[in-house]
Image: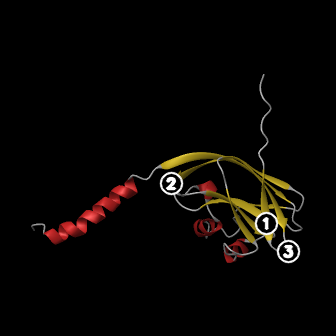
Amino acid sequence: MKPTPLSAFILLPLLSSCSIVTNMTTAKATFDVSVQNQSSQPIHVGLAKDGPPLEDDWWSPEEFATFHSKHPDAMWGQTVLPGQTATIPTIEGHFNDGVHGYLRVYAGDCSMSDMLAISRHSPNRLDLPLAEGSNRFVVLNDHDQLSARRLPVPTPPPTK
């Protein structure tokens, strides 16, 4: 079968889009995260990414529920009681272009089904963007809505 100008017209964009996909860069980043709960109720916190590559420590609750559907007792993230601070040990992630890491915060001591029912713009959920390196947050209640402040990262004393 001989290629026609029409087949070349159709194949060229497809081939060039494959080239774009294979040229994505993946950057490695390391994060330290702590979150202090200054709200009047428990909060549930964990890390998530908004894109590939998929990594165990970065699954969103939605991805976690999908991959752990046969283990209903498996739990995403951790609960932080009022007045307590949770520290997520130093964690590394791989991020394709345009993909970001987040600290996801839910109001209350949530079950998996509770988390899955709370949408991104709910007053009971925060998606706090992470910067590479140290990330410190304080979570508060503000008129029955979660809010957060990013705390400054302490600068190390100068070395002599």
Q: Residue furthest bottom?
A: 117
Query: For the residue labelled by badge 2, is the local secondary structure a helix, a strand or a loop?
Result: strand
Q: Are marks 3 and 2 in contact (CB under 8 Å)?
A: no
Q: Rounded to the nearest whole Å, what is the CA distance between mark 1 and mark 3?
A: 9 Å
Q: Is residue 40 left or right of residue 15?
A: right
Quadrant into which the C terminus falls:
top right
Q: Is residue 100 left or right of residue 104?
A: left
Dot label at residue 147: 1
Image position, residue 44 (x, y; %) = 77, 64
Q: Give the residue drawn at x 19%, y 66%.
A: 8
Q: Give the residue drawn at x 66%, y 51%.
A: 131
Residue 69 found in image quarter: bottom right
- Position of residue 159 relative to residue 151, above or below, is above
Task: Provide the residue designation for mark 2.
Answer: 96
Residue flagged by tag 1: what amino acid is it? Ser
Query: For the residue labelled by badge 1, is the local secondary structure a helix, a strand or a loop?
Result: strand
Q: Give the residue drawn at x 54%, y 61%.
A: 51
Query: For the residue labelled by badge 3, is the local secondary structure a helix, a strand or a loop?
Result: loop
